[in-house]
């Protein structure tokens, strides 16, 4: 499939995700109106919807009918949006632009931004628990908690802040000098963990439609695929921060270098970083090919992630 056709598929799926996200974020008894506004502002901002699209592509890869991946797709985007709200706060990355517009705390203030993130975090598990049979719902909640938690995304953010030198974050066990291995481990958690969980959620809900659990070897292939595209995505993001334009990136560029963040171009240089992204893409495509013909879009996605300009 050429890239234009794949992007058309992606945009179509992302548009449907947006509809489901909006449906999930409606007024509820006892919910403050201003809180809902902040949640919707952050979640419904224009974005790639990479993680929910991964849920959908993984779910479609097995050819089962009557699957319902949409709640899982919404749940991972709620987690992602909550993480962005908190990452953008002055205490962490201190960003004022996200997805081409002011960050949540710039519009709603820091206190409400924190609470909007908290609400989205809990909303993700509410959606999973009420949308799937008990066992599948519990498996989804467990997988998402692992991907988003202290050993996954949150732990990766702690490592990122530690390398940046945030006061009080770095522990005695933290390495003194950065290496590519340290950077890979950081982003395998900060970026890759939620990507891997998104893929596995797609498999869990797909097999749940057949009253089955996905085979462990299949979950391992998805995990390995997610690890490769997660790192490829981050390497490309680091390159775009050096080479990109603010208008296409939708956020400030050059900010990583200004803050002394640990990046692939900073450790490897630009050309070696480009080569690494290409190698990770090839690895991911090989893994996706093992899932059968219905997984072809996962191969196309790997190619797109390293060739994008935003």
Image: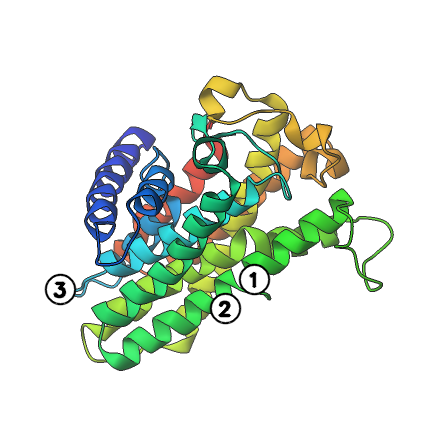
Q: Residue 281: x and y, percent?
A: 50, 44
Query: Do the residues under discs 3 and 2 have CB atoms within 8 angstroms?
Result: no
The 10 Å Cα crowd at callout 1, few under 14, some 14 to 19, many 20 or more, is many
Residue designated by label 2: 146
Residue designated by label 3: 65
Query: Do the residues under discs 2 and 1 have CB atoms within 8 angstroms?
Result: yes
* Vertical position of residue 167 compared to residue 253: above or below: below
- In front: label 1 or label 3: 1
* Vertical position of residue 17 compared to residue 142: above or below: above
Label 1: state its secondary structure.
Answer: loop
Q: Residue at x 77, y 54 (%)?
A: 168
Residue designated by label 1: 152
Gap in angstroms between the C-alphas marked 3 and 2: 28 Å
Label 3: state its secondary structure.
Answer: loop
> Residue 45 occupies which quadrant of the picture?
top left
Q: Upstream in the sequence, badge 2 or badge 1?
A: 2
Q: Is residue 62 left or right of residue 154?
A: left
């Amino acid at each position: 499939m050429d890239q234009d056709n794949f992007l058309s598929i992606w945009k179509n799926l992302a548009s449907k995700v947006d509809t489901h996200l909006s449906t999930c974020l409606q007024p509820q008894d006892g919910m403050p109106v201003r809180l809902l506004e902040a949640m919707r502002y952050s979640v419904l901002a224009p974005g790639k919807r990479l993680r929910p699209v991964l849920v959908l592509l993984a779910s479609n890869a097995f050819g089962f009918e009557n699957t319902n991946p949409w709640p899982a797709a919404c749940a991972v985007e709620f987690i992602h949006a909550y993480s962005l709200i908190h990452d953008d706060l002055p205490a962490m990355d201190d960003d004022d632009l996200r997805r081409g517009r002011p960050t949540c705390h710039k519009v709603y203030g820091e206190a409400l931004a924190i609470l909007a993130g908290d609400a989205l975090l809990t909303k993700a598990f509410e959606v999973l628990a009420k949308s799937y049979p008990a066992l599948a719902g519990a498996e989804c909640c467990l997988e998402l908690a692992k991907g988003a938690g202290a050993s996954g995304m949150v732990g990766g953010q702690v490592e990122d802040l530690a390398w940046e030198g945030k006061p009080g974050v770095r522990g005695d066990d933290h390495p003194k000098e950065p290496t590519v291995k340290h950077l890979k481990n950081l982003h395998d958690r900060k970026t890759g963990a939620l990507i891997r969980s998104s893929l596995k959620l797609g498999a869990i809900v797909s097999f749940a439609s057949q009253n089955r659990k996905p085979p462990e070897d299949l979950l391992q292939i998805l995990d390995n695929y997610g690890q490769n595209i997660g790192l490829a995505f981050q390497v490309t993001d680091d390159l775009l921060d050096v080479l990109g334009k603010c208008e296409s990136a939708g956020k400030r560029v050059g900010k990583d270098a200004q803050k002394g963040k640990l990046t692939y171009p900073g450790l490897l240089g630009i050309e070696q970083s480009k080569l690494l992204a290409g190698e990770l893409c090839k690895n991911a495509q090989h893994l996706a090919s093992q899932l059968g013909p219905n997984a072809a879009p996962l191969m196309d996605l790997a190619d797109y992630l390293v060739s994008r300009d935003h």
